[in-house]
Image (tube, rainbow, N blue to C red):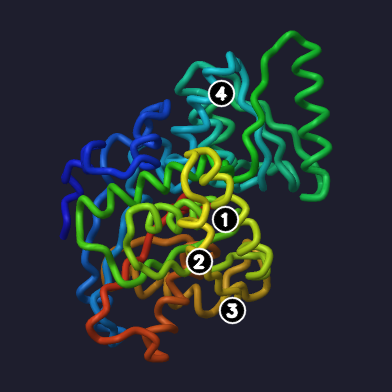
């Protein structure tokens, strides 16, 4: 087990774009490097190479998860803009919504959530946490209503004299994705570069940040995003757009990032977003029973199911080191 106590590389050792990341304003939410653990028994059970897990599910703040890394940068921008309210969108059980509402509460801001889905009679899991955090929640029927409702809510809050700040879905913007550019440096301070990173993806911000981080650190790690919902073509396009935005934000050689490969696997979506599959159930139970590692059943479990399938299909060499980046979401188990 890697304790996750290594000190990130000093800015003197980083290339200019990475120095700019370290110099950018951030609200400290993470609390230190997340652990990396070696899944010896899990690997043996599936006949795999060396498999490790980066435990972003273990971030202490607000039940952790990948959105917290993004919110460090996004929240700092909101404060710099003089915002007194964070507004975002998501499903009733959105992990992103929970992280955004928690950030608002922590910073003394008001949190407004536009949630697509029916108002639960008895809130559970993320919906319960959103209420406990004091969020103002507006329910809409479908995802298609999100964009216009966000515009309407922002306008209403401004008319009331507030200063709202819109946080896009997943905080998946070039600014938010810097959280994972920085996280790659954290990982490399804990271990040698893995041959492959496998993680769950949807809004593409985490994927873009890891891809850009590997490229800027000059490591040849293959990054595989496993879609939880959308076609691979759509997520790849979003990721490349965000990577281009990162290059602009950091004022760096766009070619370094533009040439970085973006790979998304849509083969484990099953019946759709938020719906578990037989493969995700198997991955979830296997991780719990063998390593006491908990993944949610519709997002991270689908990415872990992909990793298992790759091993069984012989897609990794026996000498490979594979890192599963656990992006959180375990609160969804209690929905």
Q: Is residue 168 toward the left or the right of residue 303 in the image? A: right
Q: Are marks 1 and 2 in contact (CB under 8 Å)?
A: yes
Mark 1 = which residue?
A: 204
Asked whether residue 124 appears in the rendered view, the answer is: no
The vertical placement of 242 against 273, above or below, is: above
Mark 2 = which residue?
A: 225
Q: CA distance from mark 4 to mark 3?
A: 37 Å
Q: Residues within 10 Å of mark 2 (few under 14, many from 20)?
A: many
Q: CA distance from mark 1 to mark 3?
A: 16 Å
Please name which of the two marks, 4 or 3, marks the residue nearer to the observer.
4
Image spot of residue 215 (x, y percent): 40, 58
Residue depicted at x 57% and y 41%: 171
Residue depicted at x 57% and y 24%: 134
Seen from the viewer's position, the closer of residues 185 and 112 is 185
Dot placed on the residue nearer the N-terminal end, 4 or 3: 4
Dot placed on the residue nearer the N-terminal end, 1 or 3: 1
Mark 4 = which residue?
A: 78
Residue depicted at x 51% and y 57%: 255
Image spot of residue 19 (x, y percent): 34, 37
**Badge number at residue 267:** 3
Residue 227 is drawn in which quadrant? Answer: bottom right
Dot placed on the residue nearer the N-terminal end, 2 or 3: 2
Q: CA distance from mark 4 to mark 1?
A: 21 Å
Q: Is residue 8 toward the left or the right of residue 82 in the image? A: left
**Which residue is situated farthest in the top direction here?**
161
Dot placed on the residue nearer the N-terminal end, 1 or 2: 1
Q: CA distance from mark 2 to mark 3?
A: 11 Å
């Amino acid at each position: 087990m890697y304790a996750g106590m290594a000190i990130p590389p000093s800015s003197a050792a980083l290339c200019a774009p990475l120095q700019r990341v370290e110099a950018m304003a951030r609200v400290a939410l993470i609390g230190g490097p997340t652990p990396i653990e070696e899944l010896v028994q899990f690997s043996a059970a599936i006949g795999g190479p060396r498999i490790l897990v980066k435990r972003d599910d273990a971030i202490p703040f607000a039940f952790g998860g990948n959105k917290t890394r993004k919110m460090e940068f996004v929240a700092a921008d909101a404060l710099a803009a003089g915002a007194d309210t964070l507004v975002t969108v998501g499903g009733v059980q959105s992990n992103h919504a929970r992280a955004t509402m928690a950030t608002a509460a922590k910073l003394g801001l008001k949190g407004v959530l536009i949630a697509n889905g029916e108002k639960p009679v008895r809130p559970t899991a993320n919906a319960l946490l959103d209420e406990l955090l004091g969020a103002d929640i507006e329910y809409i029927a479908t995802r298609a209503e999100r964009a216009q409702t966000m515009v309407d809510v922002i306008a209403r809050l401004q008319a009331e004299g507030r200063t709202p700040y819109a946080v896009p879905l997943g905080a998946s913007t070039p600014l938010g994705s810097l959280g994972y550019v920085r996280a790659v440096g954290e990982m490399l301070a804990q271990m040698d570069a893995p041959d492959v990173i496998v993680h769950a993806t949807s809004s593409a911000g985490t994927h873009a940040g890891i891809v850009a981080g590997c490229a800027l650190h000059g490591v040849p790690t293959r990054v595989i995003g496993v879609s939880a919902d959308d076609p691979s073509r759509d997520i790849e396009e979003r990721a490349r757009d965000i990577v281009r935005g990162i290059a602009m934000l950091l004022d760096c050689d766009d070619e370094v990032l533009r040439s970085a490969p973006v790979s998304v696997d849509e083969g484990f979506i099953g019946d759709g977003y938020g719906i578990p599959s037989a493969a995700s159930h198997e991955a979830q139970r296997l991780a719990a029973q063998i390593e006491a590692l908990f993944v949610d059943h519709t997002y991270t479990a689908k990415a872990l199911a992909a990793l298992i399938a790759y091993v069984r299909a012989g897609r990794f060499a026996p000498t490979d080191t594979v890192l599963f980046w656990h992006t959180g979401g375990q609160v969804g188990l209690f929905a």
